[in-house]
Every structure is written in C-alpha cells, then in structure tokens.
Image (cartoon, rainbow, N blue to C red):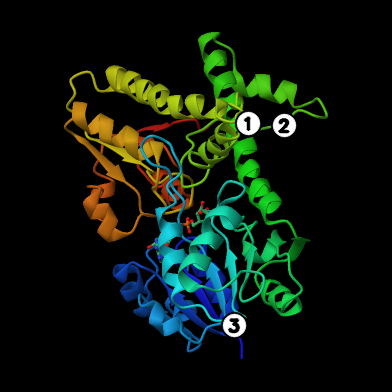
C-alpha cells in the first residue's frame, strides 16, 4: 500500500501534503515541534489553510521520523537558504538525508523538491543516503526531483492550476509516482534528467530577479531625470516584445537566494557569472531608495517629528505572511531607530510573530495615526486604508506604477 511522507511542512510542503492526503495516507514530518503542534491543532501560521483542511483523518503530523517507518514514498521540501556570506546553506538537506538514510527501505522512492543548483540531488543528497543506508540508488531505492513553482498569495497560479516539472530517470514504479504527482498539479512536464530540472528551476527565478532588477534601475533613473516612469513604460509597452515588469521590493525565500546558488556552482566550474547576480544589487538598493523616499515624506509632513506614523504591510509581498528577507521589514526597523512615534502593521503576519517583530496594533488603534505609509499593499490593508477618515495623510509607496 502506498504511504507518503512529506518532509518539511512550510509554504511548499503543506499544500502538497494536503493535496495528497485526499487519496493517500500521509505523514507530515517537520523538525519544528511548534509547527507540528500548531498543525495538530488545525492552526496554519501562514493563514493559508482552514482548520477543516488541516485536520484530516488521513494525515498524521509528527516531528519524529520513526512514524514514517512504513512510508514508501518520501517528498522532501526543506529550506535551502544562503549563509551570510551568500554561499548555499545545504544543512537542512544534509540533515534530512542523514535521517532518511536510517529509515528508508528497499524499493522506496524519494522525490526532492527544494530549489538547488544543478547536481545537488545526484552529487550531494544521494551519496549521503547511500553512505549511511548501505543501499544503492537506482537498484535498492529510487530518487526523483520535482521543483516547486508555488507562488504564495497568488490565487490564479496555485498548485492545482500550474504545470510542474517532474524528473525521474527510472521505470521502477514510474506510473504510480506519476499518477500521485498528477494529483498535485494541472500538468506534469516529464523529463529523465534531474540536473536539467534542477537548473530549470533555479534559472526561472534568476530570470525574474534580473528582469525586476532592470526595471527597478529604469525606475530609479527615470526619477533622477524627472521622467514619468509609468508613461515611459506604457510607451515602451506598445512594442510587441517589450516585457512589462513592475519595480518593487524583492524579498522572500526565492529571488534573493537562488541566483547565489547558480553563481556558486558556476564559479566551482571556473566561470564567474556576470549577469546572474546583476539584479541583486539594484533590488537590494530599493530598500535604501524607499527609505530615503519615506524620510523625505516625513521631513515635509512631520517637521516637528511628533506625528504618529503607521507603516503598513511588512511581509515580503502582497497577500502573503512570509516575512523572510522582507525589505519592507528592514525599512521599518531602520525607521524605528530614527523616529519614536512610528509603528508597524501587518495583519497577514501571525500574532506570535507580530509580537516578536513589535507589530502589535489593535483594530481600535489602527485609526489613531496621523500619517499612514503603505509599503506592501495586502487586500486587507487596502480596505482598511480606504475606510480611514479624510483628514489622514496617506502615502502609498510605489503604488501608481
Ligand atoms: N516559498 C516559496 O514560494 C517557494 C517556491 C518555490 C520553491 N521553494 C523552495 O522550496 C523549499 C522549501 O521552501 P519553503 O518556502 O516551503 O520553506 P519553509 O521555511 O516555509 O518551510 C520549510 C519547513 O521545513 C522544516 N525543516 C527545516 N529543516 C528541516 C529538517 N532538517 N527536517 C525536517 N523539516 C525541516 C521547517 O521547520 C519548515 O517548516 C526551498 O528550497 C525553497 O527555495 C519555495
């Protein structure tokens, strides 16, 4: 009988687990006891799933991999961040591979989903598992790779509506594993080459990061030249092959991270990338630029530095709770150092975290500020701002472009 274990129940792992549990018995394993405890209570800290969706009889949440002893398919969706020096941090993958090597049996299938540079699955993950399990991949157990394209907060491109690359070089249980994955997404793009699938995923994000970097740069130059950026883009967009990107604050676990993975493996192979990281500097610089823009607003409208200011929307992008690498949050933390009467507000970020980040504003307090500055405009923030009385000063940063 097929029994599936999803390892890492974050933005990527949880939706996969919930989809598969409609048909299969599943174990949801996560190293974080807090995460497991809240899921067991039917609470999703990311506020994406309801209690009913989380509390299904077919799912066992656990932070003990022993509970997955009789699983025969393992889907791994742990984080792949970077260290401060921008080098890939593979410690989560290493940990999972070591633990799995003590649990897997002959004929088990492992599918990795984390974003990595080409070669990690074959040259990093599989050797760790083989070393400790004494099993041979391709003979005793089988490994595939299916990169994730989930776009949190995006209702149009959710898992069920997108296609997904699936790399699996074997015939063994292929039909079965494909039918399982077909439950997850609209269409599978099937390949046998894991390294090419790994490369495809990472370059999707690099292309986006570089393009946003370019449009951010164009935005900054238009400002210097006193040109109406929106009009410039509208005019350029009349050409059939002009790509319309929007300037903004780039954060999260993907774009600020993945280019460094690709640049790293390229360097190891004696090629120093010249364009891969080109978006990074400009995209990060947007934080400083917007900080200056806000300081200028305050110079004009809060001359005596005594007005109460509320900075709204601090996660990394609209309608998501994820605040990893959020430039909006960095801006808030910097403003707090220079202004006493400034508060942060983000109703998407869960209460515990909001407490830690100092973002606690009660519903009543929300209307008690003099100046409102919106950075990341979640739908809920737009609604609340629209309801404010006319005497409030409201500044929507990067809103009219
Ligand atoms: N978030 C996205 O939008 C997105 C999109 C596409 C791809 N990805 C990729 O998917 C992967 C996962 O990203 P995410 O956003 O879901 O991360 P996340 O941080 O939201 O979730 C990861 C989960 O894994 C758990 N975990 C960490 N180490 C573990 C370990 N050793 N054993 C078991 N569990 C462990 C964490 O506690 C966490 O709950 C990353 O490689 C990321 O680049 C993310």
Q: Considering depth in this image, is 217 or 275 the residue closer to the camera?
A: 275
Find residue 160 and report its image quarter.
bottom right
| Vertical position of residue 139 compared to residue 120: above or below | below
Cα–Cα span, label 1 and label 3: 38 Å
Residue at the limit of the structure toward the right, as seen here: 240
Q: Nearer the viewer, mark 2 or mark 1?
A: 1
| Residue 194 location (% of width, % of height) | 68, 56
Residue that mark 3 sits on: 22
| Residue 49 location (% of width, % of height) | 47, 70
Q: How many residues crowd mark 2 within 10 Å: few (<14), some (14–19), many (20+)?
A: few
Kind of element beneath mark 3 = loop
Residue that mark 2 sits on: 243
Q: Quadrant of the C terminus?
A: top right
Instruction: Work out whether residue 47 can be spotted.
Output: no
Residue drawn at 38 percent across, 24 percent down: 288
Decide if residue 146 is on the left or right side of residue 399: right
CB contact under 8 Å: marks 2 and 1: yes
Disc sitting over residue 211 in the figure: 1
CB contact under 8 Å: marks 3 and 2: no
Cα–Cα span, label 3 and label 2: 39 Å
Residue drawn at 34 percent across, 22 percent down: 297
| Vertical position of residue 113 compared to residue 398: above or below | below
């Amino acid at each position: 009988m097929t029994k599936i274990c999803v390892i890492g129940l974050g933005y990527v792992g949880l939706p996969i687990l919930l989809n598969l549990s409609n048909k299969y018995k599943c174990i949801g394993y996560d190293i974080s006891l807090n995460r497991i405890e809240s899921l067991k209570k039917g609470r999703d800290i990311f506020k994406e799933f309801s209690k009913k969706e989380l509390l299904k009889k077919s799912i066992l949440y656990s932070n003990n991999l022993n509970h997955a002893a009789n699983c025969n398919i393992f889907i791994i969706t742990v984080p792949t961040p970077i260290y401060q020096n921008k080098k890939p941090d593979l410690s989560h993958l290493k940990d999972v591979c070591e633990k799995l090597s003590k649990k897997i049996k002959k004929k088990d299938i492992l599918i990795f989903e984390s974003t990595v540079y080409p070669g990690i699955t074959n040259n990093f993950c599989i050797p760790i598992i083989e070393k400790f399990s004494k099993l041979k991949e391709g003979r005793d157990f089988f490994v595939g790779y299916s990169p994730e394209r989930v776009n949190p907060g995006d209702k149009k491109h959710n898992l069920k509506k997108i296609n997904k690359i699936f790399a699996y070089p074997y015939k063994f249980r292929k039909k079965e594993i494909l039918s399982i994955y077909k439950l997850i997404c609209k269409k599978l793009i099937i390949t046998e080459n894991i390294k090419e699938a790994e490369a495809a995923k990472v370059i999707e994000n690099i292309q986006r990061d570089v393009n946003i970097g370019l449009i951010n740069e164009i935005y900054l130059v238009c400002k210097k030249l006193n040109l109406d950026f929106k009009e410039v883009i509208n005019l350029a967009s009349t050409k059939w092959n002009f790509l319309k990107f929007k300037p903004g604050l780039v954060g999260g676990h993907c774009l600020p991270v993945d280019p460094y993975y690709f640049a790293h493996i390229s360097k190891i192979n004696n090629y120093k990338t010249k364009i891969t990281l080109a978006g990074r500097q400009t995209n990060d610089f947007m934080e400083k630029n917007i900080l200056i823009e806000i300081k200028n607003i305050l110079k004009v409208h809060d001359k005596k530095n005594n007005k109460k200011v509320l900075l709204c929307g601090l996660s990394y992008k609209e309608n998501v709770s994820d605040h990893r690498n959020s430039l909006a949050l960095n801006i808030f933390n910097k403003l707090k150092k220079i202004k006493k009467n400034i508060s942060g507000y983000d109703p998407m970020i869960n209460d515990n975290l909001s407490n830690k980040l100092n973002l606690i504003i009660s519903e009543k307090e929300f209307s008690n500020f003099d100046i409102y500055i919106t950075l990341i405009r979640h739908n809920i923030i737009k609604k609340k701002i629209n309801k404010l009385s006319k005497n409030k000063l409201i500044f929507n940063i990067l809103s009219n472009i």
